[in-house]
Amino acid sequence: MKMFRSICCLLAFLMMAQIAVAADFQEMEEEARDNLQMSMLEFMSKNDNFNVAEDEINAARLTENKTLRMSITLFMMSMYGIVVSGDNTVEEIKVDILGENGETLMTKVINNKNRDVITLNADYTGEYQVNITPIKINSDDDFFKVGFVSWAMLYEE
Amino acid sequence: MKQKMLTFTIIMTVILSLFGCTKKDKNKEPQAAEPQDVKIESILPQTAYLAAVRRQLKDVEWSKYIFTGSFDYDKSKDSTQIWAYQMGVLLTNCGFASAIRDQDGVKHLSDEILDHAQKADIVDEDVIMKIMDIIHSFEALIKDENYREISNKVKEIESVIRKYYKDKQNESVIMTVKFSCWLEAFYIVAEAVTDNYNDALLNLFNRGQEVAYFQKSFAKNSKMGEAALLTKLAKEMEHKDSMSEASVKKILAEITEFRTQYVK
């Protein structure tokens, strides 16, 4: 009976912990999406020939220095915008753009508060890789620093 | 013994609940990722492709490449896949007609989209009403010559359809519409390049990443021969330096043949 009670307590504790973490993550994801939306609106109000590629804003959970690698085909003679934001714990995000042979075409560190948008004029038609890495996350936990990054592609019409 | 069984059941419940909470939502896009290095592939909307194409093929009379037909879709005879392919054709052409400011094309294709949406197995009237409202807004937008907004509204129709089938957990229809939009844009470009060929335009066929993306998507679920078509396209585009006018013609022929399954 004692064992049964201990297991029940453990179960309740684990479930509460999971609910708390899930709620935290949800809040962080929303923050990242909201920040991205602000960056995007700010950029598009000044550059009205750009359009957003996705209907839904993307977001991913990443630990510090882990990378999201996105492959995408871009077309020659066109400009593209890459908007990246993090939740409020994310301070700096590095964005690398690689060409089809893996060569680095551009590297930029974005301060999450500055709402920078990276623009790229595609030199050739074909595959590009966009790497997004949160390089500085402010967290109470020094061991497990996790944050949400959100990104969107813009294209010139 | 009873207590042991109970303990075992509780432990299993704990394990299952933990896995249950952390497992990926099947409906989510692949972007919703675990905290580690993540690889994703992305496809730009076909308006982006067609905009780039128009920059490279400036003196082309684009209106002649716009689809002007209509579909006799009969839901008692035809499959939802056919409906989805036809919807992709209409959406891409309508978006393209608005990009080239083809008033007649927009009017014809928007009527067709509405008619086609009403023939679908969409049981939620709100969805049809939403599409109807979007289409009805086109008249005022055409008067204002706000073709850019029409283009955005066409994308919105695609989102409405995607959301409906996502809620119905029918990922296959969503992927078919996406693929059909992609293939139709490719068809328009292959036709235009065939008619106005020069070697510099071959870059427009360097779409191996996109082909690979759809190959993965249709690897297990190729209902209408999508996988076979994609293999043929990949083969033609494999060595981009050795591509020629003949390769473009071959690509156009392959897409045309595939397209006859839903465009009579």
Image: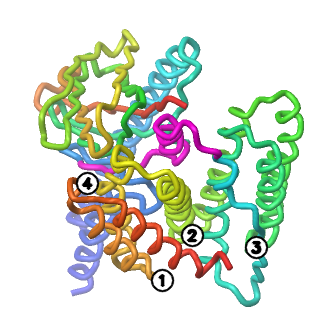
Residue tagged 3: B71
Q: Nearer the viewer, residue B235 or B200?
A: B200
Q: Is residue B112 visible?
A: yes
Q: Tell me how far mark 2 sits from mark 1, CA to CA.
A: 11 Å
Q: Tell me how far mark 3 sits from mark 1, CA to CA.
A: 20 Å
Q: Chain of mark 3?
A: B
Numbered tag placed on residue B173 in the rendering: 2
Residue tagged 1: B223
Numbered tag placed on residue A10 in the rendering: 4
Q: Nearer the viewer, residue B49 or B85?
A: B49
- Going from N to C along the chain, the mark reached first, 3 or 1, is 3
> Which secondary structure, mark 4?
helix
Please, what is the three-letter code of the amino acid marked with disc 2? Val
Res. B226 image quadrant: bottom left
Percent position of residue B188, x then y: 55, 57
Residue at x-position 37% and y-position 11%: A113
| Whether marks 1 and 4 lie on the same chain | no
Give the class, few, some or many, for how many residues have Cα within 10 Å of label 2's Cα (few <14, many ≥20). many
Percent position of residue B176, x then y: 53, 68
Please, what is the three-letter code of the amino acid marked with disc 3? Phe
Numbered tag placed on residue B123 in the rendering: none
